[in-house]
């Protein structure tokens, strides 16, 4: 399995989800689809899912999550990236390449008004939940490894000038 398999699953889940804009609805649809697979195939989706989490573990994306959600702890950043995965491959890849591009998303624009957090813990447990549903057992330990890169030099997410400089469109939405 590779990340293409995860993206295929997420794409199918978005098509069958009650509300494809709701990340938890996409996660529930993905669990329903994945739990029909043989247990070894379910388990094989774990590493590619966490590889997506690793590729999106970036300082600039964390800053975007901080702006959008009014803060982002370690767990909050994980849940934000879960939400981002549920938005589909194109949105995810665009955001990883240019986090400020999130300012184009209807959901992000709406969040600037509603202050609703964009997050989904459920996306992070798609494989675990599907495996448990299919087998009645927990996903075996060691099914995946989390390999986060070094974030490098830190940003001061509370420095409005720095946020305007680095993420001007998101800063305009959330700081003005």
Image (tube, helix red, strand yellow):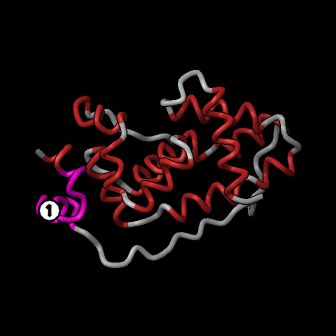
What's the residue at 50%, 74% (across, down)?
149
- Among the 4 quarters of the image, the one containing residue 128: top right
Q: Quadrant of the N terminus?
A: bottom right
Q: Is residue 122 magenta?
A: no
Q: Residue at x 61, y 26 (%)?
A: 17
Picture quadrant of residue 25: top right
Residue 89 horizontal/vertical position (percent):
56, 49
Q: Is residue 116 left or right of residue 83?
A: left
Q: Is residue 165 magenta?
A: yes
The total of numbered circles placed on residues is: 1
Q: Residue drawn 88% across and 43% down? A: 38
User: Could you tell me residue 125's position as x and y percent?
Assistant: 62, 44
Which residue carries the number 1 mark? 159
- Residue 155 found in image quarter: bottom left
Q: Is residue 69 above or below residue 1?
A: above
Q: Going by the image, does 1 lie left or right of 3? A: right
Say if 160 sits above or below 112 in the image: below
Quadrant in which the C terminus is drawn = top left
Is residue 88 shown above or below 163? above
């Amino acid at each position: 399995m590779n990340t293409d398999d995860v993206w295929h699953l997420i794409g199918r889940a978005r098509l069958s989800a009650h509300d494809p804009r709701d990340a938890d609805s996409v996660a529930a649809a993905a669990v329903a689809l994945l739990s029909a697979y043989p247990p070894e195939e379910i388990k094989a989706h774990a590493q590619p899912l966490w590889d997506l989490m690793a590729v999106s573990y970036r300082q600039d994306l964390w800053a975007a999550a901080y702006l959008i959600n009014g803060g982002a702890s370690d767990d909050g950043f994980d849940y934000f990236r879960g939400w981002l995965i549920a938005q589909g491959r194109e949105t995810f890849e665009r955001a990883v390449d240019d986090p400020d591009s999130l300012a184009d998303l209807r959901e992000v624009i709406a969040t600037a008004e509603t202050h609703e957090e964009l997050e989904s813990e459920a996306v992070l447990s798609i494989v675990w939940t599907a495996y448990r549903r299919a087998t009645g057992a927990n996903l075996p330990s060691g099914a995946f490894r989390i390999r986060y890169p070094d974030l490098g030099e830190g940003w001061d997410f509370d420095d409005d000038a720095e946020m305007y400089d680095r993420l001007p469109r998101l800063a305009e939405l959330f700081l003005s």
